[in-house]
Amino acid sequence: MGNKTFPFLLLILLALRTQGSEFNFSSAFILPGISVSYSNRTPFRNHDNIDRVEQLTSKKLLSLGALAGKRFPINHKFRLQITADVHYGRNVADTLFNVSLTDETIRDLLRYEYIFSAGILPQIQHQLPLQNNANSYFYAGVGLFYSTYKEKLYDFNQTITIEDSQLSSSSRFSFALKTGIGVEFPVSNKIGGAVVYGIKFWRPVEYNESRDLFPMGIDYRERFITHSLTIHLLLPDPSRSQ
């Protein structure tokens, strides 16, 4: 629990201690931005033949991302932000021991998962009143993401890729709900910075799973709850006076 609340506490401390700015970044460009995300994944299998949904053991995923975007002022309290972002993560999903291969060798194997996502996220930001000269805001938005999922088998040294017809893959569009809190501060006379915590609810993985226990295939999907910490620069829009 402590690890999950740390980004939020960090933002609160920044809000209390960061010196304020007279800059107005409500029309700023966001470029560049980098983020680290940690996802709690809840997998499900849908057994249509017996009308039952099976919840499986939870999984985790650490991913890195980049983003860019633009802010548009609405009034003195609210603004619209639109960002395009991409994320990539890799995870060891399983360890397989003493597997007989087609070359008649027996090896221990690692099954890797690769997840890539790209999308657009519009969000409404509510700027909070200045507290101890800090600029902070809450935000919420709904975005659309395209995600790909792929599994690969390697030997333990990751020098040989193993072909297997039962490895799963998928690609799909999914909506995502994201909310969080951010703190912005001046970096120089013309540039600002921001530290943002977010939590995103979405379902980027869904495919027909085919394995030894169910060779005809079964519906498999995962629900993600993704915590992210993002740092990005704020560049003033030259067409607007700051």
Image (cartoon, helix red, strand yellow):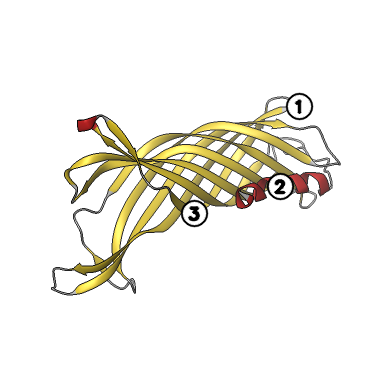
Using the rendered view, name the quadrant where residue 79 is placed. top right
The kind of secondary structure element at disc 3 is strand
241 left or right of 65 in image: right
Query: Residue 136 location in percent, x, y?
Result: 74, 39
The reply to whether residue 234 is visible in this rendering is no
Name the residue at 30% across, 59% down: 152
Disc ID at residue 218: none
- Of 100 and 194, the residue lying toward us: 100
Residue position marked by numbered label 2 in the rendering: 9
The kind of secondary structure element at disc 1 is loop
Residue position marked by numbered label 1 in the rendering: 76
Q: Tell me if label 3 and label 2 are in contact, CB under 8 Å.
A: no
Of all residues, the one furthest to the right in this rendering is: 132
Q: Tell me if label 2 and label 1 are in contact, CB under 8 Å.
A: no
Q: How many marks?
A: 3
- Amino acid type, mark 3: Ser
User: Callout 2: 10 Å neighbours few (<14), some, many (20+)?
Assistant: few
